[in-house]
Every structure is written in C-alpha cells, then in structure tokens.
Amino acid sequence: MRTLLVHQGEKPLIGILEDGQLAEVFFPQEGDTAEAVLLGRVERIVPGMKAAFVDIGQEKNGFLPLEEKNTGLSYPKTGDAVIVQIRKEAQGVKGAFLTRDISLGGETMLLTPMSRMVGVSSKITEDGKRKALKETGRAIAQERFGLVMRTAAENAPEEELAAEAERLFQQWEQIRRAAPTAHVPSVLMQPRSTLEAVLDDYRPRGIDQIVTDDPAVEAKAAGIAPVQVIPENLLTIYKIESQLKKAQERRVWLSSGGTLVIDPCEAMTVIDVNTAKFTGKRELEDTVLRLNLEACGEIARQVRLRNLSGIIIIDMIDMKTPEHRQMVLDALEEAFASDRVKTVIHGLTSLGLVEMTRKRSRPPLREMLAKQEEAHE
C-alpha cells in the first residue's frame, strides 16, 4: 500500500510510505530551484572543458556544458545572455548544473522546445504501445518542438495529450518572449512546487491514499486518491523522525539478523551485505541466497530514502552458483522497479560485486536534512 504523507508545519515534509515504511522523502523549501528556467550571463568560457560558467544570481556560478545533443545552438560568448534551466541544484562546492536543452514537465509528457525528437519513457516496454505513442507525439508536435511521453500518457486520450502539449508550448512561448527585455540574471519560470512534482511523478505509479494535516491539499490532489485530513502530528503517528534518524546510520539491520553497511564516498557509494547474527537453519548456500534476496529489497528502500546516486557498488555475500547470482540480480531489478529515478543494474564484476548507477536528481538525504536545519536556525 502506497501512502502520500503531506505535513505542513515549521518544517514541511512530503513522504512516500510503502507498506508503512518511509521509502522517499522531500523537504519543500523556499528557494528550491531545480527545473527553474533562468536568464543568465556567461562569465567565463573554458575551452578545455567545453563548458561555460554562467551567473544565474546564485552564490556560485552555474556550470553549462557547451555541447548538447539536439539543441542546434551555437557556442555562446563571454558576456552573452543565455536562457538556461537548472538540471541539478548546487551541491557542496559545486554550482548548479545547467542546460540549454529546456524541458517543461507536465503530467503526461515533457516538452523540449530546442529539439524535434519524440521519445517514449523507457518504463513503457510494449513495442506496440511505444510505437503508437510516438506516432501520436509526432502528430501533436508537427516538428514545432520535441516530446517525451511519460508513463501517464499510456492510457490518456489523444485530445488530452494534445491539450497538455499546447499548454506547455504556450508556456515556452511566454518564456521566449520575456527573455529579450528581462533583467540579467533573473528567473523566467519558477519550478513546480514540490507537491506538484511528487503528484505528477507518482500519479501513474499509483497512490492508494493521501494523509495530510493541511486542508488545502484536498483541492490540489482532487481525483488522484482519497484524502484524509488529520489535525494530529503526522510525524509522530507515522514515526517519521525515528525512520529519518535510522536512515542516517551507517549500519542497517535486516529482519533476519543480517546487516547492510552503507558508505557514501566522493566517487561512489559502497554497500556491504553481512550475515551478522543470521545463520539460517539450512545449508550454507541456501542461507546465503535467502539473506542476499532479503537484502535486495532493503537496499532499494535505503537507496531511495537516502537518495543515493551515481555509482553504487554492492558487495553481496559470495554465491557459488550462477543460478543464485542471477536470482539476486533479478530480485534487485524487481526491487528498483518502483524507483521513479532512472536506475540501471549493470551486473556483476569479475570479483562478484554488483555494479549499478542511479541518476542524480536531488541532493542526498543527509544534505537535505542539514539544509532544512540551517533554514530554521
């Protein structure tokens, strides 16, 4: 059962609970900038990096790659005003990661005004449906813009898709017309609210209920799932604070007595699976397989909850048979199937380590919690 929890208070929080356990968490804050479209000024070109540093009005200049597929844009010069979008927010010593390949998100699609390509979400796997959606997308776009059809487009009527595409295109036209007279740097389009983004992402995946202490959420979530407004402290009722505290610990206990040890490093995250107190009552190989299979589900939950990204290496307990190794890889794929962030399981190395990558969309949980504390000091 999937529950969307919306808490409005001194420290707002949006959580996704799956079978009562916190699977993902968001902290809405003033000043969130991911997806914002800005007018910036090129401060410096670095030819060796094929990149520019752009003043976007933040403490650190943003990083803009100069070579981007499908945009057809020429290199800017120092001093030029450029329309950019924040792809990744500033993190640590790094400024925001920028792109000129603007994408405007809706419930059923992304509109890309700098491209003419029409694509379909990789989560839609049936060839017939992919082909039909591409044909529909091309008919709607008529080479005026590009589209990426999201999973929610799979069962949407064509007229609904066309209406959303037109709305997003008019949004782009407003941005384009405003840019020549706008102050540099300035915001041309504010990002979606955190709640809007979460609802758009999870609507096609299914939400069974929404629980909130904010009556205004009822109108915003109309038609998505039943909304229950509870005046009591939701964080206490659902034990959110204790779950967040555990999600910052290095060691995670599995119900069987085994453990995960999670070590985020600069270059990658390493997750070690250990037997700890788990011995099992059968043969060693069966014991190892059962523990590794249990670990797969908890690894997926911890990666999502902690918002770990980049290269992730998992050191499973050594398995002797190819069949057992494949069973564990399949279980890991299944465990990450509900992840809204693009995740790829690359397989086993020659040393038996699982290699996977996860796209970075937001800062890790520990950093978001620290940022929230700073905002309320």
Image: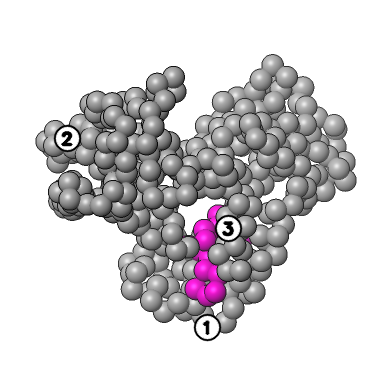
Q: Secondary structure at mark 1?
A: loop
Q: In the rendered view of the protein, which quadrant contains the C terminus?
A: bottom right
Instruction: First in sequence, mark 2 or 3: give its number.
Output: 2
Residue 156 visible to an observer of this rendering: yes
Task: Please state if 34 lies on the left or on the right of 353 as rendered.
Answer: left
Residue 274 pos. (x, y %): 81, 38
Residue identifier under label 3: 371
Q: Position of residue 225 (x, y in %)?
A: 40, 66
Given residues 176 and 264, the one toward you in this image is 176
Marks 2/1: CA–CA distance = 48 Å
Which amino acid, mark 3?
Answer: Lys
Residue 231 tag number? 1
Residue 210 as seen in the image, left or right of residue 116: right
Instruction: Identify whether 245 is placed above or below 279.
Output: below
Magenta-highlighted residues:
8-28
Q: Secondary structure at mark 3?
A: helix
* Image disc number at residue 16: none
Residue 115 figure quarter: top left
Q: Earlier in the sequence, mark 1 or mark 3?
A: 1
Q: Foreground residue, 258 or 45?
A: 45
Residue, disc 2: 138
Query: Looking at numbered disc 2 in the image, what kind of residue is underneath it?
Result: Arg
Q: Which is nearer the eye, 1 or 231?
A: 231
Q: CA distance from mark 2 to mark 3?
A: 42 Å
Horizontal and vertical percent for residue 80? 27, 36
Q: With respect to residue 225, does 192 lie above or below?
A: above
Q: Are marks 2 and 1 in contact (CB under 8 Å)?
A: no
Q: Position of residue 64 (x, y in %)?
A: 39, 34
